[in-house]
Image: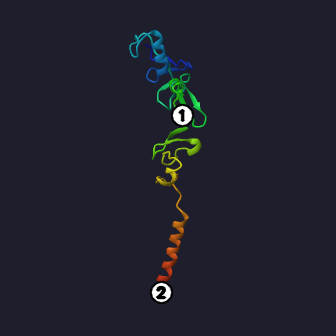
């Protein structure tokens, strides 16, 4: 085996240490040749790619070539492999509330918070959320009560000085 290999996609020369096999292409080849996973003879090399020609499936985290892992959703920027797309795995526009675990989607519940990185449903976001960025805003009544308390204290202080 040569130390210098070529990326199957862009044909850039890459070292054996930096060559990345596409796990999905590799499975397909083994199935076509009739070998079980990991039982293929050493003389048949899996397709190898450079890092620029591979993507990671955001759903199952398998690294594959750009033919097997493609851009799946323009709203959330999700990449998905063939298997996840065929099995109808939801993209990043769908998830579960961090607090109550109900199903949520970006259309009704916005996005996960950029600060705490948690995704709350519209109800838990208002009550069960300690994050200063996405949590409930302080109520104006509490702020007004604090100001009134401050006003009441000032006359008491002047009465003590006389």
Question: Relative to residue 120, is residue 73 drawn left or right?
Answer: right
Note whether 100 is above or below 81 in the view shown: below
Q: What number is the disc on residue 102? A: none
Say if residue 4 shows up in the picture.
no
Q: Residue 151 placed where, x, y %?
A: 52, 77
Quadrant of the image containing the N terminus: top left
Within 10 Å of the Cα at label 2, are there few (<14), some (14-19), or many (20+) other Cα atoms?
A: few
Instruction: Say which residue label 1 marks.
Output: 91
Residue at 53%, 62% (x, y): give it.
Answer: 139
- Most extreme residue toward the right, as rendered? 74
Q: Residue 96 placed where, x, y %?
A: 48, 41
Circle nearer the N terminus (2, 1): 1
Say if residue 7 shows up in the picture.
yes
Note whether 150 is above or below 93 in the view shown: below
Of residue 54 and residue 11, the one placed in the foreground of this image is: 54
Of residue 65 and residue 133, the one placed in the foreground of this image is: 133
Q: Quadrant of residue 11?
A: top right
- Most extreme residue toward the bottom, as rendered? 162
Within 10 Å of the Cα at label 1, are there few (<14), some (14-19), or many (20+) other Cα atoms?
A: some
Q: Residue 155 placed where, x, y %?
A: 50, 82
For the residues labelled 2 and 1, the Cα–Cα distance comes to 66 Å
Instruction: Say which residue label 2 marks.
Output: 159
Question: Relative to residue 100, is residue 72 drawn left or right?
Answer: right
Q: Nearer the viewer, mark 2 or mark 1?
A: 1
Residue at 54%, 30% (x, y): give it.
Answer: 79
Q: Residue 148 placed where, x, y %?
A: 52, 74
Label 1 secondary element: loop
């Amino acid at each position: 085996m040569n130390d210098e290999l070529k990326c199957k996609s862009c044909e850039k020369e890459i070292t054996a240490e930096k060559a990345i096999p596409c796990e999905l292409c590799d499975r397909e080849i083994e199935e076509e040749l009739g070998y079980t996973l990991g039982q293929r003879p050493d003389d048949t090399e899996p397709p190898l790619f450079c890092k620029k020609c591979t993507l990671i499936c955001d759903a199952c985290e398998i690294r594959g070539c750009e033919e097997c892992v493609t851009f799946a959703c323009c709203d959330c920027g999700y990449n998905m492999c063939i298997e996840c797309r065929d099995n109808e795995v939801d993209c990043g526009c769908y998830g579960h509330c961090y607090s109550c675990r109900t199903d949520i989607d970006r259309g009704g519940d916005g996005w996960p918070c950029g600060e705490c990185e948690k995704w709350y449903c519209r109800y838990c976001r208002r009550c069960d959320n300690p994050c200063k960025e996405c949590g409930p805003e302080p109520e104006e009544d509490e702020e007004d009560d604090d100001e009134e308390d401050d006003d009441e204290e000032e006359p008491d202080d002047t009465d003590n000085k006389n």
